[in-house]
């Protein structure tokens, strides 16, 4: 039991810390460049993003931990690959968008991210249901974030 608790703790801390540091790395561009962009009227207030992402990263970490716990299962290995790809895409999106201002490239990135998250959900839905359930709110948020990113690309 203690081993599982430690595993969960490590997964949550690592995912949250990487995301926190990435968020800090782009903060300057959020406060300057991003504020100057034309955005969708559905864009939430700025305070919503860190709150939502903190919860989503917790759920993502739990999903990843669950797959890691079952990594010896042949299906889990493929799911972990898809999970890893979507995490790399997730962590790539912020620098692409906020630091480099590659709006079009960030649209491609977030669409690929959404695709690999959906694939992970579909691959885990039967044998690793907990993992799948943990990713569903994240996938829905990604669809909304994709819409916001596309609107910014079109308007700017």
Image: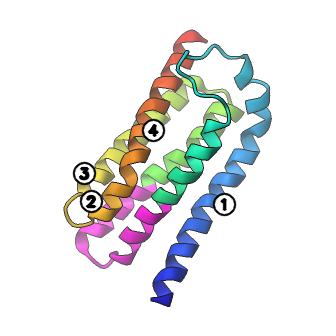
Query: Hey, which quadrant is residue 16 in on the image?
Result: bottom right
Q: Earlier in the sequence, mark 1 or mark 2?
A: 1
Q: Which residue is mark 3?
A: 122
Asked if residue 126 lies left or right of residue 34, the reply is left
Asked if residue 14 lies left or right of residue 120, the reply is right
Q: Is residue 28 above or below residue 66?
A: above
Point out the image quarter for the C terminus.
top right
Query: Callout 2: helix, strand or loop?
Result: helix
- Please give the label number shown on residue 1: none
Q: Earlier in the sequence, mark 3 or mark 4?
A: 3
Query: Hey, which quadrant is residue 45 in on the image?
Result: top right
Majority secondary structure in the magenta region: helix
* Magenta residues, start to end: 61-84
Query: Callout 3: helix, strand or loop?
Result: helix
Q: Which residue is mark 1?
A: 17
Q: Which residue is mark 4?
A: 141
Q: Which residue is mark 2?
A: 124
Q: Where does the image place residue 75, in percent across and percent down from the top left?
A: 24, 67
- Classify 10 Å Cα crowding around label 1: few (below 14), some (14-19), many (20 and above): few
In the image, residue 87 lies in the stretch drawn in magenta: no
Judge by depth and name the residue closer to the eye, 123 or 145: 145
Residue 46 shows up from this direction: yes
């Amino acid at each position: 039991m203690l081993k599982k608790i430690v595993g969960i703790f490590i997964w949550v801390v690592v995912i949250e810390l990487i995301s926190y540091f990435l968020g800090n790395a782009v903060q300057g561009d959020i406060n300057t460049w991003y504020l100057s962009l034309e955005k969708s009227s559905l864009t939430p207030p700025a305070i919503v993003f860190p709150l939502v992402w903190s919860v989503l990263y917790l759920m993502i970490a739990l999903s990843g931990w669950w797959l890691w716990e079952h990594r010896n299962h042949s299906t889990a290995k493929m799911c972990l690959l898809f999970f890893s790809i979507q995490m790399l895409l997730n962590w790539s999106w912020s620098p692409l968008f906020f630091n480099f201002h590659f709006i079009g490239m960030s649209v491609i990135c977030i669409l690929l991210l959404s695709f690999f998250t959906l694939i992970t959900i579909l691959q885990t839905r039967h044998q690793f249901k907990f993992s799948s359930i943990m990713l569903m709110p994240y996938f829905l948020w990604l669809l909304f974030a994709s819409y916001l990113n596309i609107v910014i690309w079109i308007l700017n």
